[in-house]
Amino acid sequence: MKQFPVAAQTLEAFRKGFAADKSLRAAANAASKTDLAEIAFCGMEAARLHHHFSVEIPTMSATNQKSSGRCWMFAALNVLRERVAAKLNLEQFELSQSYCAFWDKFERVNYFYDCILDTAELPTDDRTVTYLLQTGVHDGGQWDMFVNIVKKYGVVPKHAMPETCQSSSTGSMNRLLNTNLKAGAAALRKLCRENPGEAAVLAKKQELLKQAFDFLCICYGMPPETFDFEYADKDKEYHIDRGLTPKSFFEKYVDMDLDAYLSIIDAPTQDKPYHKMYTVKYLGNVAEGQKVAYLNLPMEEMKALIIRQLQAGEVVWFGSDVGKFGDRAGGTWDDKSFEYELLTGLDLALTKEERLDYRDSCMCHAMVITGVNLTDGKPNRWKIENSWGDDRGEKGYYIASDSWFDEFVYQAVIRREYLEAYDLNQELIELAPWDPMGSLAR
């Protein structure tokens, strides 16, 4: 590699230039005591974002995922709980996030070992093997992965499997589990090299699964097989339904056709032509479950579909990059409310395509869209139900400007009946395991 050292005279010119620029010195003074986001925040721009929406669906109090990465699961269960609450006239209700998280973790351990066996002949420094080992099993996930868990295991009310210290703060649990998975991967790959036959390999895998199951029971508690559903409605009338199973509870009280929905994405990169369908290799949880599937659409088409679903009275699960241009305390996401380039002098301009290609942005958080404000039929702000508790934003509800939405929203789950104009039966194009469209599950 040809190298070009920084010359002493260049540094001297830089020093003199900084010292002579009053605006740079003022920025340095401010940065010495205040976070850059606070300095760059533009209150006049943020004042445009009001908690009033022309299309708004009433929803319950915000939930709190605490110190865990279960946003995708909280968001999905927040969609489901509205159906239960409407059916039973409930003021407040939550489904158990711990129950679904337990089975997701367990199924992903099994899925991980299947991936390890599928790549057992490759060296450990192969990019795919390295990716699998580094990624392991963590808290993130995708809509289709949630569907797989619910179809196989059902759901339960929160009181049937409440939170634990480990479910609410998953760092230590994940570290131990992933070290155990690496030890298991080493054992399985060694066994495959010895070639004792499939039965011996599967027996070892079964032993490893038992270790994981026991550990997850320590962390989450044992998932219930049956339970009694007790609740009081808005009229303070007490009810109890005895002897339910998680699947019978879903069928009776949620009663939602999960196959009626499909994920749409906006990924404007050259490797993903619009109106094609995609999946991501080695992204999943339940071995026999459906693949993660996306239909790639331009943002204007995506927004039109989201608005159609909201106008029909149904909230929308979606994935975005909340690490960009967010005021967490105030509860807004707006790229116009932060003047980083003015403050720093840095060139920060990237297109959405470039952000994905150059790994500057990706889906990192899932939430629920519950409203939109339309002016002459066009959106200018969106109402967001988050899962970070009720002490931020408007009691846990946030606002996203439409310009931020364009740049940093990547996925939404839409009813298939609204997708009649698209070919949903086309073959899925498989993306690499490390593709940005799989990032929410990592």
Image (cartoon, rainbow, N blue to C red):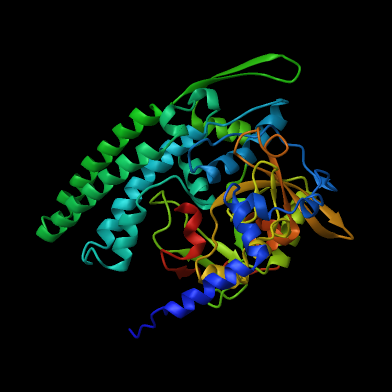
- Name the residue at 68% across, 30% down: 85
Q: Is residue 416 left or right of residue 68?
A: right
Say if 421 sits above or below 180 in the image. below
Number of marks in the image? 0
Q: Is residue 102 left or right of residue 62?
A: left
Asked whether 241 or 108 is in front, the reply is 108
Residue 39: x and y, percent? 66, 52
Q: Is residue 48 left or right of residue 154?
A: right
Asked whether 384 or 251 is in front, the reply is 384
Q: Is residue 284 left or right of residue 276?
A: left
Residue 58: x and y, percent? 77, 37
Residue 33: x and y, percent? 59, 47
- Name the residue at 49% across, 21% down: 227
- Name the residue at 84% across, 55% down: 374
| Residue 267 shows in the view | no
| Residue 437 shows in the view | yes
* Location of the N terminus (image quadrant): bottom left
